[in-house]
């Protein structure tokens, strides 16, 4: 059976980008067709300046939102990365296979390191090695497919490269994984700055729709989205990034395609209004279920405890095999 692994990092509140680019597909498709694991990757949240209490709160919230989005512990494994030691164990071995040059070429590293430097902060070494830990997350489970948004493509490519290199040097050990992306909304853009990704970690403000935003807030953010000069509704991501972003969001909510929808609208106003309502309706059941789950924290904790136990059992043989293959003496 196909093995799927993916994760979300608790560095901010989950956004519409996370939902459309990744989480919705995990719930609607992936958990039903494969042996799937979904993880709150909390170790990754320590790679930038962080507040320990906030990381804990966001980890709990992210796990609750994954369940509210429809992940079903009877169908898939939901857990927190730091509860399974195998991720960090394997990460070190993969650091011995990766080169510093390939780490420094990672786009997200370059962008985030530059941002930390302009804030006057130092860049944590873990920010540089982050993609290796991500590769370990994936390779520790013999993963075939990694359902992600567009921005993670380069990181999954690295996981592939490391798997191939490890296998060539030390004998066949890892499955070589591949990324899968949604057909539309693989990169949802910031509503106020439609040439930048809608990201939970870096930004604050009116350009980001959070999964837990009140309906009125969602409507306001979408109605105030920056559109492009020109009046007609055309799908052209390069030339008309603002309108194209709204068309993609609407298409993702309603199941159409953005080019086709462009022909239906004559004004930006009616496109915004319909997009706002579609997003409110899409998120309504997630928000309701989230409220219910918040009233039952013991249930969420139980899911995470069982999930970690299952994940540990799945990861252990892959990581032990890598320890043996690379030349480490097995314990007596
Ligand atoms: P993260 O937490 O930034 O995002 C979680 C998932 O949401 C997708 N995504 C988006 N998709 C479309 N439009 C957007 N604006 C948007 N923003 C985010 C991301 O592509 C991702 O699929 N490094 C990862 C977490 C990670 C991981 C892994 C993922 C760690 N280990 C192993 C897969 C497998 C990250 O920072 O995702």
Image (tube, grey):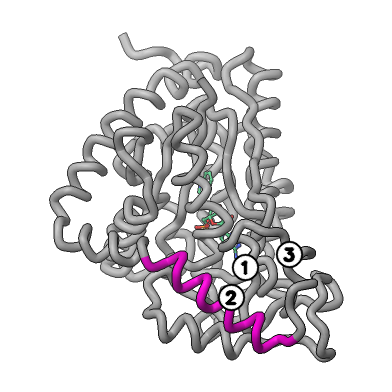
Most foreground residue, 275 or 263: 263
Vertical position of residue 175 compared to residue 262: above or below = above
Give the image quadrant in which the ligand numbered 1 is located. Answer: bottom right
The residue under label 2 is 275
- The structure residue drawn at horizontal position 65% and vertical position 63%, both measured from the top left corner, is 251
Check residue 258 in the rendering and tell me which mark sits there, or answer none.
3
Q: Earlier in the sequence, mark 1 or mark 2?
A: 1
Callout 1: SS: helix
Q: Are marks 1 and 2 in contact (CB under 8 Å)?
A: yes
* Residue 134 x/y as whole percent: 53, 44
Query: Residue tagged by mark 1?
Result: 249
The answer to whether 273 appears left or right of 263 in the picture is left
Residue at disc 2, secondary structure: helix
Stretch of the chain drawn in magenta: 267-284
Q: Residue at x 33, y 24 (%)?
A: 313
Q: Residue 167 location in percent, x, y?
A: 65, 19
The crowd level at tag 1 (other Cα within 10 Å; few <14, some 14-19, many 20+) is many
Give percent across and percent down for residue 205.
50, 85
**Element type where label 3 sits in the image:** helix
Look at 41% across and 18% down and name the residue there. Answer: 317
């Amino acid at each position: 059976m196909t093995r799927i692994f993916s994760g979300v990092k608790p560095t901010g509140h989950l956004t519409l980008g996370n939902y459309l680019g990744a989480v919705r597909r995990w719930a609607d498709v992936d958990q039903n067709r494969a042996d799937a694991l979904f993880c709150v990757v909390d170790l990754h949240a320590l790679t930038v300046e962080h507040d320990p209490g906030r990381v804990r709160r966001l980890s709990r919230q992210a796990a609750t939102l994954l369940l509210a989005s429809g992940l079903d512990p009877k169908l898939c494994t939901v857990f927190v990365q730091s509860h399974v030691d195998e991720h960090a164990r394997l990460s070190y071995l993969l650091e011995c296979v990766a080169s510093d040059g390939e780490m420094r070429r990672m786009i997200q590293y370059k962008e985030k390191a530059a941002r930390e430097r302009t804030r006057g902060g130092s860049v944590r070494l873990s920010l540089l090695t982050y993609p290796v830990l991500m590769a370990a997350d994936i390779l520790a489970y013999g993963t075939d497919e990694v359902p992600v948004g567009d921005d993670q493509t380069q990181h999954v490519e690295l996981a592939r490269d490391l798997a191939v290199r490890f296998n060539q040097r030390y004998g066949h050990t890892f499955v070589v994984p591949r990324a899968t992306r949604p057909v539309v909304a693989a990169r949802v853009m910031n509503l106020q700055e439609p040439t930048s990704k809608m990201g939970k970690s870096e930004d604050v403000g009116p350009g980001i729709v959070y999964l837990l935003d009140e309906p009125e807030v969602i409507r306001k953010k979408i109605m105030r989205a920056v559109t492009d000069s020109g009046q007609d509704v055309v799908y052209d991501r390069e030339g008309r990034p603002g309108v194209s972003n709204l068309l993609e969001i609407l298409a993702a909510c309603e199941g159409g395609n953005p080019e086709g929808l462009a022909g239906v609208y004559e004004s930006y106003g009616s496109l915004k209004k319909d997009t706002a309502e579609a997003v409110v309706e899409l998120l309504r059941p997630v928000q309701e279920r989230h409220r219910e789950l918040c009233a039952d924290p013991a249930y969420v904790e139980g899911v995470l405890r069982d999930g970690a136990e299952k994940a540990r059992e799945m990861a252990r043989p892959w990581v032990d095999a890598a320890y043996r293959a690379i030349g480490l003496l097995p314990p007596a």
